[in-house]
Amino acid sequence: MVQKYGGTSVGSVERIQAVADRIAAARREGHEVAVVVSAMGHTTDELVALAKEVTPHPEGREMDALLATGEQVSAALVAMALDMRGVRAQSFTGWQAGIATEPVHGAARIEHIDTEALEAALRAGIVPVITGFQGIAANAVTTLGRGGSDTSAVAVAAALKADVCEIYTDVTGVFTTDPRVVKTAKKLEHVSYDEMLELANLGAQVLHPRAVENAKQFQVPLVVRSSFTEEEGTWVTETAQGFEQRHIVTGIAFEREVSRIALIGVAVGRHGLASVFGTLADNNVNVDVIVQSVVQEAEVDVSFTVKDDDVDKALRIVRGLQDHLGYTDLVSESGLAKVSIVGAGMISNPGVAAKMFQVLADGDIPVKMVSTSEIKVSCIIPAVQLDAAVRQLHEAFLEQEVPVAES
Ligand code: ASP
Ligand code: MG
């Protein structure tokens, strides 16, 4: 098995001792274990701040060299703690573990893992304790993007053909929604990769989206559980079971700090859309929901959402393209949020979106934009009404036993 421990789980010496006890117990039960660790507590944030004190624009190569040190501290300390318990262990940095990435700094993808060193350690009865979040490309240290240790763990589990990848964190599993917003949120026993991928992309913080993507691709069963208790966690596998099969909606995810920009009366036939979104992408502005509607034959209205932080930059770009686009009006609105319902059961059950709109309408919550996929519906609403929306949707979709129609 692969066990991954997040920042809070290795956040102090006491936590590291507790983690070592857990790994030692798994060894005693006869499991072959490889461990992947995050940096201690807020170390990565502190390293980012340190670099910013030296220069406003740290170079990618050196930034990665700096950030990668956080995980090295935890890997070495966990290996020492295991040693003290009579469990043979060795720390491995990304390159020592054979983790090769694409040559990109700050958000590299893992391309390949040469497992020779890890397998030799395992054969010798040694627990490899591997730094998450990093690899090597063209002889330089690379990092995988914030939260990337989950992805490291899944990649190691896939490469070693592990039976399971346990993701240890500070919550006891994946919940129907954030328990800080809805007290009656329930821990899910089981959730499918597809649902988890939507939930992770839509704002659930518990797993890194790329980790879920890789787990699905390589069919690595995941368990999300707490390193603070013995409680069973949430399984993430190909098909959902139990509670999730009885409910059309499995979870409710949300994101705050959303802004909407609307271009009114864009002249069509000028490649306008391509140039707006191309220029935004070139400037690293992430666009989320896009809605386009034809008003008259020669004109369209286009609106899209960005994070609040990006709205000024996005407006500057759109204004710069005014001549090219020929829009008549430009409107922007901040202080919005996105609330999403997710569930594989939607595929075979019509009327889910209608019910969502009804619940929001009953709560006097205006819906500004909508986007859907096979297994999710997202609505852009005012941020001040987000908590109320989440509570009402949770009650309507998850607290009543809603039998899934037989298909
Ligand atoms: N330490 C890195 C971060 O804080 C990677 C991780 O924890 O997954 O983003
Ligand atoms: Mg994380």
Image: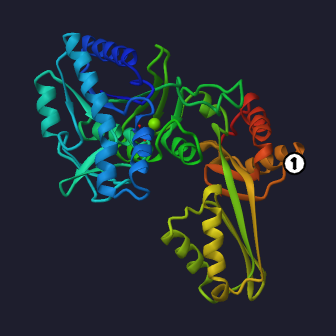
Regarding ligand 2, which quadrant of the image does it lie in?
top left
Report crowding for label 1: few under 14, some 14 to 19, many 20 or more residues within 10 A (C-alpha): few
Q: Residue at x 34, y 51 (%)?
A: 63
Q: Residue at x 72, y 50 (%)?
A: 350
Q: Quadrant of residue 333?
A: bottom right
Q: Which residue is mark 1?
A: 361
Whether residue 48 sits left or right of residue 258 in the image: it is left
Whether residue 92 sits left or right of residue 193 in the image: it is left
Above or below 190: residue 371:
below
Above or below 27: residue 173:
below
Whether residue 23 sits left or right of residue 324 in the image: it is left
Quadrant placement of the N terminus:
top left
Which amino acid type corresponds to the residue marked 1 in the rendered image? Ala
Q: Where residue 185 sits: x, y (%)? A: 67, 27
**Can residue 88 be seen?**
yes
Q: Quadrant of residue 269?
A: bottom right
Q: Residue at x 51, y 45 (%)?
A: 197
Q: Where residue 127 sits: x, y (%)? A: 21, 24
Whether residue 270 sits left or right of residue 84 in the image: it is right
Q: Residue at x 71, y 62 (%)?
A: 260
**Can residue 33 be seen?**
no
Front residue of 307/358: it is 307
Total number of numbered discs in the rendering: 1
Queried on whether the Cβ of the residue with tag 1 lies below 8 angstroms from ligand 2, the answer reads no
Label 1: state its secondary structure: helix
